[in-house]
Image: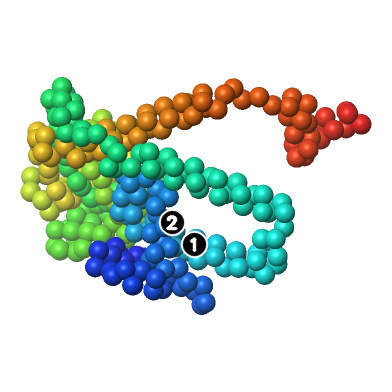
Amino acid sequence: MKRWCTVVLALVNAISAQALAQPLVWRGDTVITLEELDARLNRLPDGERATYTRDTSNIARLLDQLLVNRALAEEARELGLDKDPEVQKDIQFAVEELLAIHRLNLLLRDDAMPDFGALAEEQFLADSGKWDSPESLAVQHVLIRVGERLDDDAAEIAREVLDKARSGTNFDKLVEQYSDDPSKLENKGRFVIVDDTRFDPAFVAGARALVNDGDVGEPVRSAYGYHIIKLIRRSEARKAQFSDVRSSIERDLRNQYRENARKDYLRMLRSRMGAEEGNEELLMSLPVRYGGRPEIEQGVR
């Protein structure tokens, strides 16, 4: 599915109007077209849609869910559920919910946004250091723990790993074979050091002693054991230029504007509708009606 999503994203601008109705993904006789995916994604506001679709795994999950929903809906129709009066009332709520979403999207669409360029620059100049990039070290390590083994034994294994690393053995394989760090399953022993205080001081000192990308340092003893550290990349501190961060600042401003505009519009709408009122007797009976407070029901009896 992910492979299909990547292809779709790469070719979407070249697809003709006629091709929109052609099958995009399918399972057996259940089909979703690109035109239908477009309609579903239009439920998201402009900015959110761009962010969401940037990760093709999101589209893969969505397409899978759309296929499953379509198959379940077809079964529901075969069972006559779409004719059930209670289900029809619920369908009406679903229609109203979707119409409400699209109404707000129309209000908050990109072309309804003001130009945030001047405000973005003003924010940048007010605190330009906020967007500076500090020095960072991308490193990879093998941890040989002390505790389950003697210190001398751990040091000997660390030296063995170092010799293999410096003789050209793939470091990923060394991490997999030797490292006692449980996080290696997720990160393969890789860390990015930006804030030194988040790491063991000895580990940081060993990492910062490395000069060139690819260097592997002598074993470092920390509170956890012995580390064999490889420097992947050293990134020098960099002062941000407005051109580097303009789009990011403008995106944040648009998102904040949308959120404020949404809240303001809903506040105005509620005011226009008038104060919410209700049938107190019926409202009080709802927990019992829906089985939430049987003790009250027993007391009433």
Left/right placement of residue 258 relative to residue 129 reads right
Task: State the colouring used for the structure image.
Answer: rainbow
Is residue 178 in view from this perspective?
no
Identify the residue at image location x=28%, y=69%: 15
Task: Identify residue type, mark 2.
Answer: Arg
Q: In this view, does 258 lie above or below 94?
A: above
Residue 148 pos. (x, y %): 40, 47
Q: How far apart are marks 1 and 2 (CA)?
A: 9 Å
Which residue is at the far bottom?
28
- Quadrant showing the C terminus: top right
Left/right placement of residue 274 relative to residue 32 reads right
Left/right placement of residue 188 relative to residue 240 reads right
Closer-to-camera residue (174/294)? 294
SS for tag 2?
A: helix
Q: In this view, does 31 lie above or below 275?
A: below
Task: Identify residue type, mark 1.
Answer: Leu
Identify the residue at image location x=88%, y=28%: 299
Q: Is residue 69 above or below residue 248?
A: below
Residue picked out by circle 1: 66
